[in-house]
Amino acid sequence: MTRISTEPGTTDDRPATDDTLTPSEANPPKNKLDAYFKISARGSTFGNELRGGLTTFMAMAYILLLNPILLGGADKNGVHLDHAQLTTATALAAAVTTILLGVVGNVPLAAAAGLSVSGAISAIVVPHTTWEQAFGLCVIYGLAIVLLVVSGLREKIMNGIPLPIKHAITIGIGLFIALIGLNKAGFVFAGKGPLLSLGPTGELSGWPVLIFCITLLTIFVLLVRNTRGAILIGLAAGTAIAFIVNAAAGLDDKVWGLQVPKWPGDGPVAAPDFGLFGHVDLFGAFGSQGMGAISASVAVFTLVLAGFFDAMATIIGVGTEAGLADKQGRMPGLSKALFVDGAGGAIGGLSGASGQTVFVESATGVGEGSRTGLASVVTGGVFTLMLFFTPLAGIVPVQVASAALVVIGSMMMSQARHIDWSDREVAIPAFLTCVLMPFTYSITAGVAAGVVTYCVIKAGRGKWREPGPLMWILTGVFLIYFALTPIKAWLGVH
């Protein structure tokens, strides 16, 4: 990014580095920990980072329960993975990748098994391969992204995206995570009848959704009152209320879904089982005993595209919300964070947890004031503890954690003020970027629509040179992305 002087009206256009300082980074460090993570320099405190790290974990703890379910299907030989081993692998990969994001990238971002990756592996890859081959594809797609980072291409792409589209990405992610929160809580229902509805029948019912509403309103009130730790306090209060209601009303566990607010019946401790670690067949999926070369290549392309742009958009959105981006939307330490995110694909494959990616739930920690990688170390540390206390991950109901997502979604909407909505050349691509993320339930689809529309509109105005070569290359890639189904049919890939 451009180095910004502390003197008003002056700038320094020397090339940015990962150690570039902005005006808010002028505070001297208090100790070595502060100096390493630039806690004071970024206007944060140790307390903010601790709260932010804990809040992020609470918001994404569901992955310890959901990922083993997603990967619980049988491979082409009818082999099912052991649930305990999957839980251990999920916690291990999340802990390693998240701590690396904090220590190496110094960003308040947490990573875990990407649901889109796990879903694709389970539904598309595994029926035609062994599990070892499927995890081998995760390693390959992760290494491919690492190569894009090392070459500098990934950062150039991120920095080459026009600023209005970057703001739109932040807004779109805000809408996306708010919809995720409302849907997980049962407040907004997707099913038969209308595309979306208020609850499953057009009206709200049941204790869980009421507790979601109480938690959400509690956090909003605390935020308006400028209460420190508003989100974490709200989540703790919501969990406590859920415990009391569940015990008093004797509710069926099924009404809560995956995470039930009660003390684990077998106790909080469970020994980790690392049986899946290292069971990888790197190139087996490309052979006759796997998917075949063409099908495996298409699968890797799909995983790279989703992992690349989902993480890119999340890093832009969360980084902007944390105030880590400059006026052009560029972030210090970006290349390191991107490298770790790419390596997360390989880490997840080696661990047996599928590819790791940055989670949008990281924004909940930013909402608590986290601005540095220390928050990520805290989140990763709790994931490490969960290797031995996995039953505890299920005591915070999804309905309570979902409230934090809606709150952060409302915060991220503030980026709308930076877009000139009267300029249709940028307003239309920005609009499509914003709305298609929640409407398609895909971050990549929103980014793709914004990029393609931006370039086409510029060309239609005779300004085809303005987007630049990288944006036009991205447009070509995204056109392939949108046409992937007919392309696969043409290639004879199923």
Image: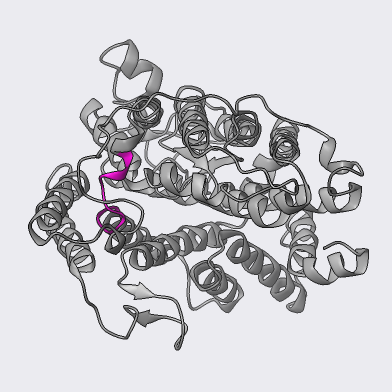
Q: Answer whether residue 341 is magenta in the image.
A: no
- Which of the 4 quarters of the picture holds residue 403? bottom left
Residue at horizontal 44 percent and vertical 38 percent from the top: 109
> Which region of the structure is painted magenta?
393-401
Give how far across and how far down residue 312 sits, in percent. Answer: 58, 48
Number of numbered labels in the structure image = 0
Residue 86, above or below 298: above
Give how far across and how far down residue 429 sits, in percent. Answer: 59, 71
Residue at horizontal 72 percent and vertical 30 percent from the top: 280
The answer to whether one can see residue 160 in this image is no
Please name whichever residue, 86 or 157, is drawn nearer the observer in this view of the structure: 86
Q: Is residue 28 left or right of residue 107?
A: left
Residue 52, above or below 129: above
Give how far across and how far down residue 210 sits, in percent. Answer: 18, 68
Q: Is residue 285 left or right of residue 161?
A: right
Residue found at the very far bottom of the displayed protein? 193
Residue at horizontal 60 percent and vertical 54 percent from the top: 119
Q: Quadrant of the N terminus?
A: top right
Please name whichever residue, 140 or 222, is drawn nearer the observer in this view of the structure: 140
Residue at horizontal 23 percent and vertical 61 percent from the top: 252
Most common SS among magenta residues:
helix
- Which of the 4 quarters of the picture holds residue 302? bottom right
